[in-house]
Image (cartoon, grey):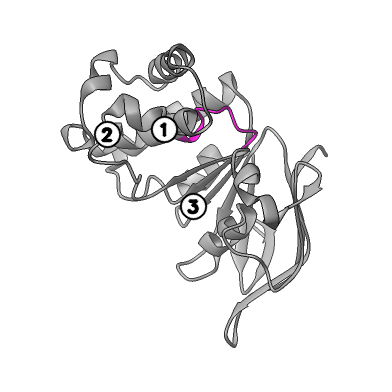
Amino acid sequence: MDSAIQFDKVSHRFGQHVIFEKLSFEIEARKITAILGKSGSGKSTLLQVINGLIRPFEGTVSLLGMPIDYENIHKVRLTIGYAVQSVGLFPHLTIFENIVLPGTLAGWQQDQKRQRANALMELVNLPAGHKGKYPYQLSGGEQQRVGLCRAILLNPPLMLLDEPFSSLDPETKDGIHTEVLKLQRTEPRCIVLVTHDHEEAMKLGDTVLNLDNGKLSPSGL
């Protein structure tokens, strides 16, 4: 298996509460891995450990074959796209400015940002006319599409999705699922999706894992 993420005997706890202990697993590159778990099972903590927001109590986390370098965590995060339930769009920035923000921080030229944003907006069916609008002028589903565009603007090899679609109505959610699968066909990458929605996990995941009592196991076991 071509692994993108490896956990080697990783443990983490908050005070006396053990989130996971000596967790070892690998996540495949260019595939979608869905992680199912109840509220409070540690799914979001797992993603925060992957992107370096949380340094585990013990063990080693490796991304793309290299242990996370916590001294240069900003550089590590340039390889990771991140989308969450709240979207996190900046209300004072236009849709275009929100999408290209990672490119701005990375020093991209305006033409490069414009071309990439246009291509991504077309991929996820966001009208070009939305570029000059502000987040409050878009629906929840459209805002999630903007969040996806921003997360993959730099074409990162890793993408983390933390319950990003849970607040959407079923019809909108179904449309977003279609866009995610289309993006994955066009630009394959390692995607880790955490969700409590079994149907969503089975629809999007090439692999589905359950996180329960600090243990990861294949769904159905």
Q: Position of residue 19 (x, y in %)?
A: 60, 74
Residue 204: x, y in percent? Answer: 53, 38
Is disc 3 in contact with disc 2, using a CB cutoff of under 8 Å? no
**Could you tell whether 82 is left or right of 166 in the image?**
right
Task: Give whichever of discs 3 and 2 has the lower sequence position.
Answer: 2
Please identify the quarter of the rendering in which residue 169 is found: top left
Whole-percent x, y for residue 42 in the image: 55, 67
Judge left or right: residue 136 versus residue 128. left
Name the residue type under label 3.
His
- Magenta stretch holds residue 155: yes
Amino acid type of disc 1? Leu
Q: At x 21% / y 35%, what residue is drawn? A: 139
- Image quadrant in which you'd find residue 175: top left
What kind of residue is marked 2? Answer: Leu
Mark 3, residues whose alpha carbon is within 10 Å: few (<14), some, or many (≥20)? some
Image quadrant where residue 28 sits: top right
Secondary structure at badge 1 equals helix
Residue 211 sits above or below residue 136 on the image: below
Disc 2 crowd, CA 10 A, few/some/many (<14, 14-19, 20+): some
Front in this rendered view, residue 120 or 75: 75
> To which residue does mark 2 refer?
93
Q: Residue placed at 57% from the left, 55% from the top?
A: 47
Q: Identify the secondary structure beneath mark 3.
A: helix
Instruction: Evaluate whether residue 203 shows in this view.
Output: yes
- The numbered mark at residue 198 is 3
Q: Is residue 120 left or right of residue 132?
A: right
The magenta stretch is 151-158
Q: Which mark is residue 101?
A: 1
Tag 1 near tag 2, CB within 8 Å: yes
Tell which residue pokes out farthest to the left in this image: 137
Q: Secondary structure at mark 2?
A: loop
